[in-house]
Image: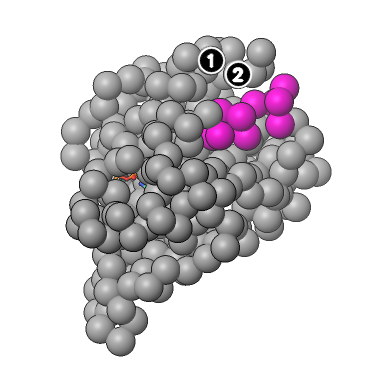
C-alpha cells in the first residue's frame, strides 16, 4: 500500500525516540532500513551504523556503506537532533554552535552526499524532522527554533531543486512527543504546555512515524513536495 516494499531508507538517529519509531514503522511497511546512532544501536532496522551527523566524512561513509550493503537509497529521514536551551541573552556561542551543527549542518551533511545519487536515479524522497518550535518559536530555544525553521526552508528549496529529477522533499513538524527530550521537561512546565495543546496530550512516537512513512510513500504522497506536515494535536498558533 505504501509502495515502500524493499525500498532502502536511511534514518539518522534511528536508535531511540522518534527515530527508532520511524525505523520500526518503515520496516512494518516493508522497507529495508539503515540507520545511524551515536551512543548505542536501537531495537529495529537492518543496518545500524555508528556515525555523527556533525561530521560530513562520517555521513559520506554511512551513505556508501548503506548503498553497498543494502542497495540504492530511495529515501532518507533526517531525524537526529538536540536541544541546548537558554534565553538568547544568556546563550553561549557553544550552545548556539552545537545545536546549529547537529540540527541544521547535520542535515546538510546527510543530504549533500546523497542528493546527487538520488537525482541521478530520478527517484526518491527526503523527510526532515522539524518541530512545532520551528513554526512558532519558543522561549529559551532561539538556536533550536532557528534550525527547525531552517529545515522548512531547506525542504521547500530541495522540493524545487529535486522536482525535475522526481525527488521530493518534505518536513514532518512534530508537536511535543513522549520521548527522552520531553521527559526531561520539568512537570510544572509540562502541565503548562499541555494546556496549549487542543488535544490535551503529547504525541506518541508512532504518530510521528506514521507521518514520516506517509511522506516517504510514492503511492500516498507522490504529488506532495516542499510541504510541512504538522503533527501537533492542533497547536497551530
Ligand atoms: P531523542 O533525544 O530521544 O533522540 C535524539 C536522537 O538524535 C538520538 O538517536 C541521538 O543519538 C541522535 N543524535 C543526536 N545528536 C546526534 C549526532 N551528532 N549525530 C548522530 N545522531 C545524533 O530525541 P527525539 O526522538 O525526541 O527527537 C528526534 C527528532 O525529533 C529531533 O530532531 C527533535 O528535534 C525532533 N522533535 C522532537 C520533539 C519531541 O517532543 N520529542 C518535538 C518536535 C521535534 P544517540 O542516542 O546515539 O545520542
In the image, residue 155 sits, relative to residue 49, either above or below, namely below
Q: Quadrant of residue 206?
A: top left
Disc 1 vs disc 2: Cβ atoms closer than 8 Å?
Answer: yes
Secondary structure of the residue carrying tag 1 is loop
Q: Residue at x 64, y 18 (%)?
A: 2
Q: CA distance from mark 1 to mark 2?
A: 7 Å
- Residue 96 shows up from this direction: no
- Span of residues in magenta: 211-221
- Residue 145 location (% of width, % of height): 45, 66
- Residue indicated by mark 1: 29
Residue 118 in the figure: left or right of residue 201: right
In the image, residue 66 sits, relative to residue 13, either above or below, namely above
In the image, residue 150 sits, relative to residue 220, either above or below, namely below
Q: Give the label on residue 4, or none.
A: 2
Most frequent secondary structure within the magenta stretch: helix
- Residue 135 shows up from this direction: yes
In the image, residue 133 sits, relative to residue 208, either above or below, namely below
- Residue 13 location (% of width, % of height): 34, 39
Amino acid at each position: 500500500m505504501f509502495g515502500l516494499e524493499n525500498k532502502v531508507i536511511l534514518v539518522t538517529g534511528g536508535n531511540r525516540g522518534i527515530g527508532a519509531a520511524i525505523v520500526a514503522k518503515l520496516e512494518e511497511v516493508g522497507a529495508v532500513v539503515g540507520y545511524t546512532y551515536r551512543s548505542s544501536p536501537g531495537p529495529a532496522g537492518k543496518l545500524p551504523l555508528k556515525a555523527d551527523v556533525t561530521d560530513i566524512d562520517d555521513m559520506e561513509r554511512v551513505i556508501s556503506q548503506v548503498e553497498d550493503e543494502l542497495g540504492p537509497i530511495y529515501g532518507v529521514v533526517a531525524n537526529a537532533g538536540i536541544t541546548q536551551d537558554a534565553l538568547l541573552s544568556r546563550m553561549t556561542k557553544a550552545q548556539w554552535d552545537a545545536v546549529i551543527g547537529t540540527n541544521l549542518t547535520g542535515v546538510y551533511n546527510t543530504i549533500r552526499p546523497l542528493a546527487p545519487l538520488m537525482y541521478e536515479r530520478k527517484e526518491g524522497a527526503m523527510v526532515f524532522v522539524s518541530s512545532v518550535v520551528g513554526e512558532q518559536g519558543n522561549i529559551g530555544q532561539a538556536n533550536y527554533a532557528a534550525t527547525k525553521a531552517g529545515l522548512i526552508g531547506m525542504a521547500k528549496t530541495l522540493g524545487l531543486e529535486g522536482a525535475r529529477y522526481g525527488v521530493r522533499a518534505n518536513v514532518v513538524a512534530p508537536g511535543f512527543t513522549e520521548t527522552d527530550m520531553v521527559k526531561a521537561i520539568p512537570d510544572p512546565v509540562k502541565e503548562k504546555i499541555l494546556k496549549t495543546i487542543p488535544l490535551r496530550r503529547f504525541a506518541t512516537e508512532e504518530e510521528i512515524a506514521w507521518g514520516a512513512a506517509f511522506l516517504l510513500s510514492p503511492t500516498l504522497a507522490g504529488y506532495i513536495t516542499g510541504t510541512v506536515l504538522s503533527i501537533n494535536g492542533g497547536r497551530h498558533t
